[in-house]
Amino acid sequence: MKTLQTIYNKNGLLWHVIARDPEKAPVLIDTNEYVIVSGNEAILLDPGGMEIFPVVFSALSAGMDPRKIKYIFSSHQDPDIISSLQLWLEIDRDIRCYTSWLWAGFIPHFGGHQDTFVKIPDEGMIIKVGGREFQAIAAHYLHSSGNFHFYDPEAEILFSGDVGAALLPPEMQGMFVEDFMAHIKHAELFHRRWMPSNRAKNDWIARMRQLKIRLMCPQHGAIYREDDVKRFLDWFEALEVGSAVR
Ligand SMILES: [Fe+2]
Ligand SMILES: [Fe+2]
């Protein structure tokens, strides 16, 4: 079972997380879904796979009106990110899906019609939700070749997709990273294998160091707070990625 929990709530701006599910089928990788509510509109970040849609939808509906969702942000093309698209469009066919122009011909294999997709150019773009401006931030090759993160300058929260992902054991189910060194052991192999480019990684780190990030929210595993965000950037900088194949 998943539940919707609120991680930010100020001045009509809310961040909710539908965090990982200890009861999900072991065959599925566990995921976090995030919902940002700004006034009367909401955007869903990486809504997840079709297999978990019923669990995500019931958790979301228990905590908010799902009809507020006007937009979906798809960081990249993977099935654990966006294969539920058609099911969300059955709730509201007018939902718009923001994703890289690179995937705009591929993701429609999961659903969508002529008006569904808003193609994000390589340099990123502003995404407006409920009168606020959010940023789709370029994160190409981290891990997908057309990949974006989602930044909220008001809440100072970064949704970082698969960056920061950790495959945590059952005894580490907390929402937030508590012990960075214990946590990051479960992230190392994932990053070495899934992230192909040191050059792309280091460019991203330099740009992230310019932003104020109070919370860094990955699509798998626990959320990094304050100093743990800085620790993650330092750790990631030192890690040689694209190196896990013998
Ligand atoms: Fe992925
Ligand atoms: Fe993922």
Image (cartoon, helix red, strand yellow):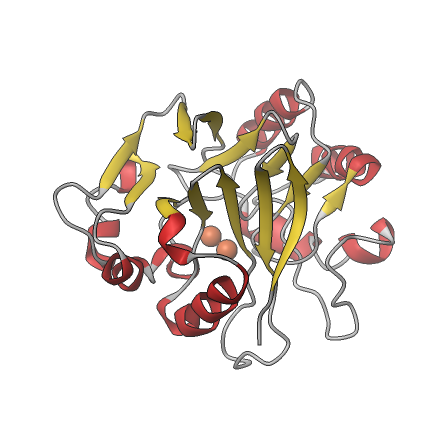
The quadrant of the image that shows the C terminus is bottom right
Q: How many marks?
A: 0
Q: Residue furthest left?
A: 114
> x, y percentage for residue 222?
70, 55
Q: Which residue is at the front of the view, 14 or 197?
A: 14
Q: Is residue 75 above or below residue 205?
A: below
Q: Which residue is at the front of the view, 184 or 19?
A: 19
- Report the residue at 32% width, 25% height from top: 121
Q: Is residue 202 above or below residue 194?
A: above
Name the side, left or right, on which 137 lies relative to 211. left
| Visible residue check, residue 105 | yes
Q: Which residue is at the front of the view, 240 or 169?
A: 169
- Report the residue at 53% width, 29% height from top: 200
- Report the residue at 79% width, 56% height from top: 183
The quadrant of the image that shows the N terminus is bottom right
Snapshot quadrant of residue 71: top left
Snapshot quadrant of residue 175: bottom right
> x, y percentage for residue 56?
47, 66
> x, y percentage for residue 95?
28, 47
Q: Is residue 140 above or below residue 4?
A: above
| Visible residue check, residue 244 | no
- Report the residue at 61% width, 42% height from top: 241
Name the side, left or right, on which 124 lies relative to 189. left
> x, y percentage for residue 68?
39, 49
